[in-house]
Image (cartoon, rainbow, N blue to C red):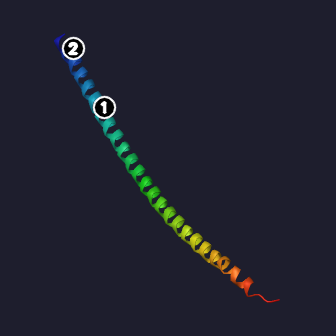
Amino acid sequence: MLKAINTKILLAILAVLTAIGGALTYQRHEAAKAAAAAAKAAAILQQQQKEAEQRKAEDEAFRERVDAAKKKHNSAAAHEGKTWRKYIP
């Protein structure tokens, strides 16, 4: 009878150790998945920041072109009055 009790206790201890081992394995797996997801999110964020900087640079270049075009077209309009004064039909 004592052997049966010892065997049951031994099996219970082994079951507990197996459960603890499984929990540790699961925890490591979940930590690895979380680390991979964090790395992926960081890479996506970095890519989005690069794209935002490129868009900002393109917008700035476009604004400069628009300002240059405005100055060019406005300068012609500023001299228009002088041409009509000198016009002789």
Q: Amino acid at mark 2?
A: Ala
* Percent x, y of residue 66: 59, 70
* Percent x, y of residue 86: 73, 88
* Percent x, y of residue 3: 18, 15
Judge left or right: residue 13 versus residue 79: left
Q: Point out the residue furthest to the bottom here.
A: 88
Identify the residue at horizontal 27%, vertical 24% (top origin): 15
State the residue in front, 41 or 66. Answer: 66
Q: Amino acid at mark 1?
A: Ala
Image position of 13 with respect to 65: above or below: above
Q: Point out the residue furthest to the top here.
A: 1
Image position of 26 with respect to 71: above or below: above
Identify the residue at horizontal 25%, vertical 20% (top origin): 12
Assess whether mark 1 and mark 2 are in contact (beta carbons under 8 angstroms): no
Q: Secondary structure at mark 2?
A: helix
Q: Which mark is residue 23?
A: 1
Image position of 89 with respect to 77: above or below: below
Q: Point out the residue furthest to the left here.
A: 2
**First of labels 2, 1 by sequence position:** 2
The mark lying in front, picked from 2 and 1, is 1
